[in-house]
Image: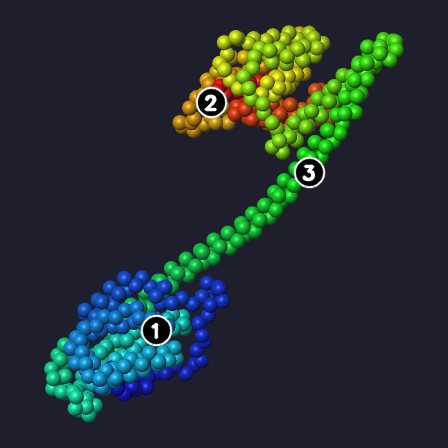
Amino acid sequence: MSGSARLPVVQDESPRSSPRNDGSVIDDHISLAELLDLDAFKDVCASFVDLYKIGIKIFDADGTKLVDIRVGNGDWCGYIFQNPVGRQKCTGLVGKIKSFDYQGLTAGKIVEQHCFSGLKYVIMPITYGGDYLGRVIYGPFRPSNLGKPASAVQEFPEFDPEKLWSFVGKIRKAPDETIIKILNNFRGVIDTITFIAMKAHMTQRLHVESVTASYNELSETNQKLRQSFEKLQALDKMKSNFLAMISHELRTPLTSVIGYSEMMIEGMAGDINDEQREYLETIKDKGESLLSLIGSLLDMSKMEAGAMQMNLQVFDTATVVEQARTSIVPQASKKRIQLEVDVPSDLPEYRADPDRLRQSLVNLMGNAVKFTPENGRIDVIARPWCGVLPSEAGGRFGPPERAFVRFDVKDTGIGIPPDKLETIFKSFYQVDNTITREYGGTGLGLSIVKRFMQAHGGDVEVSSEPGAGSTFSLLIPVT
């Protein structure tokens, strides 16, 4: 509805800064719609309309309508709006209300707008901390001194003042003092709601900023860790390639050294005396030990590179175990250790790589001989077994038991401390890692055995009692 407009009751003369939004939670500008729970806020506005019988419209700072509750003026405004002249007047009033610079008002001040028909609106800005959030348009209401339609209505013959006045009974009549009191009450409600909402918003944003900062810090740390991990992977690959290359290059000359030593021991280069034979036997033994070490390094390099080939097949278990035993007999004989093998003929059928199984048994029996005193005993026992792999154990229900062929290598040696049982399978690990340790070795044997068994879908486990011996068990699943 259009008509004359008075100046604001009070105009703020101080300069008004534009909304801030530099990314900081303190300086962040939030709209009224984002700040409020609109459904709950509309209920609050509806309660004021029901109580005072005057309509309320609320817009945010961008002019978006958030609340529009009308009461009593439908017939009055409908009669005016049906006429082109009245429609024009109404449109003009709406334009004035929208275009007025409400950001120039200080908190708590109001603007009056009059309809040409005599009704009145009051407009109050909604602010928080000096920031303009929106405005409340309260009305229309009938001023207490209005006894008939305004004189402007008389200027247009299209209007019937008496008919228009017949609709005035539904419009609330109130003096300015009453309207001001109502608005002050409503302002207090809005201030409380916006304060609580802004506090919750600030708390949430501060929390989000804190989480974001932590996330960014973690992301940066993760990036650094990822880069470090990639560098370590590259170094590890370089180490594996280096070991593989060096080991391969050493095998050929070392094989020649062992071969020529054997030929000299057999007299193919002429007669030798006992002292020379002893020296040649030492060269041959140390060469074979070094060749075994090189083979272990090559196996580790292949496994780390994922290039280890497994030849799974069904084979005669007793033959493979006997071949492993034969390899260890010379070492056991030197220490007068009794080496017994028990392989029943009715083992369940399973598929494995016979070379990897033989090498695993040789490694375990070789360790048993190394750590068993003279006149001790080593037993190698194969048997069917049902259970769960050590790596799968745990939990309330756990995985179901499966069938395995179990190879136990049991000795009467020095045993292993309980706190070392979890670490003995690590590469290059020695229980006694001092430079004066009594027992030699590279610490690769058990690590290779474990990886061989895992490649079969099985595992290796150990039980030991210091001073009473150890039992290593290879577990290969039954097909």
Residue 166 in percent (x, y) is at: 11, 82
Count of all numbered marks drawn on residues in the image:
3
Q: Say which mark, if any, is on residue 238.
A: 3
Residue 79 screen position, x and y as percent: 16, 81
Q: Is residue 93 above or below residue 374?
A: below
**At label 3, which amino acid type do we have?**
Met
Residue underneath mark 2: 388
Label 3, label 2: how many angstroms apart (C-alpha)?
A: 37 Å
Colouring method of the image: rainbow
Camera-side residue: 204 or 68? 68
Question: Element type at marker 3?
Answer: helix
- Using the numbered discs, state the Cα–Cα distance from disc 2 to disc 1 in whole angstroms: 70 Å
Q: Secondary structure at mark 1?
A: loop
Residue 239 image point, x, y percent? 69, 36
Q: Quadrant of the N terminus?
A: bottom left
Q: Report the residue at 47% width, 68% height from top.
A: 21
- Viewed as shown, does residue 6 lie left or right of 460? left
Whichever of labels 2 and 1 marks the residue nearer the N terminus, that label is 1
* Disc sitting over residue 63 in the figure: 1
**Separation of residues labelled 1 and 3 (CA atoms):** 67 Å
Q: Residues within 10 Å of mark 3 (few under 14, many from 20)?
A: few
* Residue 292 sits in quarter: top right
